[in-house]
Amino acid sequence: MIQTVATTPYPDQKPGTSGLRKKVRVFQQPHYAANFVQSVFDSLDGFAGQTLVVGGDGRYLNREVIQTMLRIAAANGFGRVLVGQGGILSTPAASHVIRKSGAFGGLILSASHNPGGPDEDFGIKYNIGNGGPAPEGVTAAIHARTLEISEYRTLDTPDIDLDQLGTQMLGEMTVEVIDPVADYADLMETLFDFDAIRALFAGGFTLSFDAMSAVTGPYATEILERRLGAPAGTVVNGTPLPDFGHHHPDPNLVHARDLYERLMAEEGPDFGAASDGDGDRNLIIGRHQYVTPSDSLAVLAANAHLAPGYARGLKGIARSMPTSGAADRVAQALGIPLYETPTGWKFFGNLLDAGMATICGEESAGTGSDHVREKDGLWAVLLWLNILAVRRQPVTEIMAEHWARYGRNYYARHDYEGIATERADALMAELRGALPTLPGRETAAGAVSTADDFSYTDPTDGSVSAHQGIRIGFADGSRVVFRLSGTGTQGATLRVYLERYVGADGELALETADALAPLIQAADALAGITRHTGMDEPSVIT
Ligand code: G1P
Ligand code: ZN
């Protein structure tokens, strides 16, 4: 029986580019999740009888909110829901299932790389039929609806058994509990040379994949250990836990320190990798060789043709503006276009849909291709493995050869977290105001040559996104970028992206910190970071 439940709006349900993200306690308020889900459906047209995909990264509240979603979907007239067994679907797997099943859209439950548990984070994101995040028009409509909602439709039915594969009925709607891994693993088999990778492992190559007790555990175990024959134990922290084992499931050098240390050890594995809470980010570390996400994008693009799925070459490469220019040099050498987009995956989606780019990446450890419409952590790991299986060289050698050909972009990101919003805004406003006066200014990194506030015109639809970050360029090709995070939950986070380019005939084996020291000094002198924030040092360096 369909029930109509009276409710009142919550004023804080504005979805960002990654959906609605809040503390678990916020989501636990009466009708909170239901209001949002009904608002999503109220903002969409034409889904009667259609398919919806539902799944999440398994964090605390995942199962409860899925039951709420299923009832509301049934009461609103969806014909069928595909839900991952146990409520599990990684973000890239959800994107694939949406595309493959021709679904109307999907609801993904995750707060990505943010911690999980009763006192931590939760989130809901709506993806459209192309498998990618809802565009701004849709999220704006959802937000407007959340402010007016007065009732939602649901059913008075018992919970669906999310662990039982197969079909169940919920009112008039079919609920199909699907294997969350199989379709995705099959897709990977079409892109990569599994025989070659299997032979690599059979030859004694060792990998440590840290699933960070998050969603990629089952995917990595199936693909790496079962289908590719890597020894048991290759996947560590492979069981998704509601609180991620109290870990922060963010695959960077701070939160995946253990893995880093194992790879730097004398007798460490040949290759290390990790993924985040919902499986869209990646960390790549070779034995004795950390690979920055910007370099990883460049190496993957330069070698993608070694994998069957990309043997015919790339249509173009896209990178977010703060990502280093390493990929630009590869695009140039390949004679293909390079697109520089604002931060955030949604800008890539348009380029992929239009067939203008094949591979994309961000400095924040997101890399992916046109196989789905989300970034994809395991995909990046498998492309690396395919390249290693063909080239049969250690990562140190692959990187050295890459830099010897293209030059090296030394790179780091300094995050200043938890700054009072007014202070962060003041820093940015002052810097913006000073832009016209900066060219010619002498700094520790030499004279400033260019200074602007990045604005992007989307080549697919002509839409303009302005104020996407301040770029300051130097004569030798070095660059500092300043922008405020759009995903933080407490105060403001200032991100300072530092990049120094050294040509192929220059010094290619410097320590990153040494290579960047003059730029770090210049960044503070230009923006007054310490003066504005009161912080002498960044909170996190990646
Ligand atoms: C951060 C990353 C950005 C990524 C986004 C969502 O956004 O910097 O590259 O697309 O998370 O995963 P930010 O907090 O910088 O706005
Ligand atoms: Zn993520």
Image (cartoon, grey):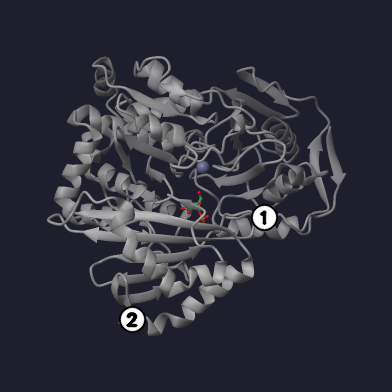
Using the rendered view, name the quadrant where residue 262 is placed.
top left
* Number of other residues with Cα within 10 Å of mark 2, as a class: few under 14, some 14 to 19, many 20 or more: few
> Pointers 1 and 2 in contact (CB under 8 A)?
no
Disc 1 marks a residue whose amino acid type is Ile
For the N terminus, the quadrant is top right
Residue at image coords 68%, 58%: 143
Task: State the residue position of label 2.
Answer: 441
Q: Position of residue 104 (x, y in %)?
A: 57, 42
Left or right, residue 189 beside residue 92 = left
Depth check: 459 or 234 in front? 234
On the picture, is 237 further left or further right than 305? right
Residue lying at 51% horizontally and 78% vertically, measured from the top left: 430
Circle 1 packing at 10 Å, graded few (<14), some (14-19), many (20+), is: many
Alpha carbons under labels 1 and 2: distance apart: 46 Å
> In front of the other: label 1 or label 2?
2
Extreme residue toward the right, this view: 6
Q: Earlier in the sequence, mark 1 or mark 2?
A: 1
Looking at the picture, which amino acid does disc 2 mark?
Answer: Arg
Q: Is residue 387 above or below residue 113?
A: above
Q: Position of residue 227 (x, y in %)?
A: 37, 18
533 over 185 or under it: above or below: below
Q: Is residue 492 above or below residue 161?
A: below
| CB of mark 1 near ligand 1 (< 8 Å) | no
Image disc number at residue 258: none
Residue at x 53%, y 76% (from the top left corner):
429
Give the residue number, with chain letter if any, for mark 1. Answer: 142
- Helix, strand or loop under label 1: helix
Q: Is residue 57 visible?
A: yes
Q: Quadrant of residue 79?
A: top right
